[in-house]
Amino acid sequence: MLTVDVGERTADETVIDEVLEATVGGRATATALAHERIPFDADPFGAENRAYLSTGPLQQSQMSFTGRMNMTGLSPLTDGLVSTNAGGYLSRNFVATGYSVLEIAGESEELLAVHVTDDGVEFEEVPELEGATVPETSDYVENQQGLGPEHCIAIGPAGENRVRFASVMTFDSRAFGRGGLGAVLGSKNVKCVTFDGNVEPPLEIPNPPESEIHREAATSDDRMRTQGTTGGTEFINDNFSLPTRYFREYEFEGAADIGGNAVEEKKYKKGACSACAYACKLPTRDEETGVETEGPEFETVYAFGSQQGVDDIVDVMQANELCDTLGMDTISAGVTVAAYLDSVDEFGNAELAQELTEKIARREGIGDTLAEGVARCHEELGVENYTVKGMEFAAHDGRVLHGQGLSYAVANRGADHMYASMLSLEYAGQLDPDGTLGKAETLVDRENHNAFRDTGIVCAFGDDYVTEERLETLFDANYEELALVGARTVELERHFNNQRGFDRDDDGVPYDLPDIEDAIVEYYDARGWSDDGTVSDARLEPVAGAALSDD
């Protein structure tokens, strides 16, 4: 692990072999380190908060679905521990520096660019980048360091201005999106971090299945490869629910105009992440207006489309590009803007929505209020608080998908669909969407699986290819052992949040679900937690060497 203290301008290496042996990498390793090294009473915007950027063993391969990295820290949006991951081309450049984890600590008085190589760390004061967009920052790095955006993480104006849902961006358009870690870097006055080196990966990845997975990804005819996540827009709208006009309605009459076919019509080339043959990204362009972006994905179609009553795909593309350029999570930004549109009865006003998006990033006028997120501004707006633990809802409607609703209620991250992804089982008919009782064991299994997937690290879209059996071969372990790593990660997150005051009162959703209270009890029982939703100190299994205390 490389610890960079941006206040002291120091860079120290710590051997974390024992931690990695116990936690594998990615989210699990970062969570174990954060649990030990971030004070339980830390201010998310304080110098004592830390941000962890981490890889897993599979980032040392050239296998499809592995071009991703994890980021973990104390969230200014939820006030709890949060992990998020992003694709792109960063991971191999990070691995080439010779590190498994970067820990960013302290707080700089001056705006900084930090340059990490296999030879050392350089701190560069960059006052000229104050207020710069993400692409402007990338241009600066390329001109000054000769490194493209695939070597860089950066924040935009939103991060500098501590917008609580600011993203950390890489490759200009890939986001460590949920939870506001961009604002954490902003509070530390870190504008960007670059990575470059020539260290050879020290691990051998079993082949097969590496080559088999790569071949299957390259030859798949999955609609994801042409329409990304937007391919299911109309199916979800017609058969389940596409939350519309700030949750007032369950379906959107303009879904076809912002769905998969509309996006595919604007797609002008293939897009992928590092070493991935699946190529499911969506570089899109509108020739008439000149709008060009990567996406939008389904969550953005929901947040800046149906939720706002906007039915023009070009408007959604423009909003997507604004969020990438300014450095904001499209889900939280779009839902927060929708809440404002609700308060002033301006649904469908895409021009106003885009104006608000820019104001949020710069905290100008009403944007300063909206930059706090729905949980902190809903009373002033006079709208319902559609969040869980302070996080705005993803598209998949727990009012219809009750297993997903239960997941939102108990997830340590809040209303994040990727925490357990119960939605995939309910959409596919493998789990009855009605009812919450009897789903706790499945929910626990899904949470554990996803936590390990974020540890490996494997892309969520690779689940059909990187199967449990193949995970066993890749990691030379029984799947039950891998799932246990995930379970311990979820438990550490919960324990950390408990120490900050989270308990059963924080587990719930802002709408009625059948038997939800009893289902939450079932979930606690399945986890072996107390009936108040807390994890006792006695349950924690110490991670060998994880304390790594600064004391």
Image: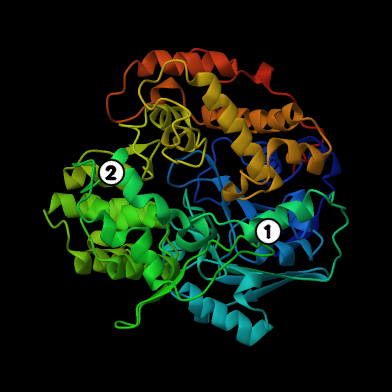
Q: How many marks?
A: 2
- State whether residue 332 appears in this view: yes
Q: Find residue 2 and report its image quarter.
A: bottom right
Specify the quadrant that holds the C terminus: top right
In this picture, residue 309 sits left or right of residue 12: left
- Residue occupying the point 35% across, 15% down: 515
Along the line of sight, which residue is nearer the eye, 161 or 92?
Answer: 92
In this picture, residue 494 sits left or right of residue 55: left
Check contact, mark 2 vs mark 1: CB within 8 A: no
- State whether residue 30 appears in this view: no
Q: Residue furthest left?
A: 345
Q: Secondary structure at mark 1?
A: strand
Label 2 amino acid?
Asp
Q: Which residue is mark 2?
A: 238
Q: Secondary structure at mark 2?
A: helix
Q: Which residue is mark 1?
A: 5
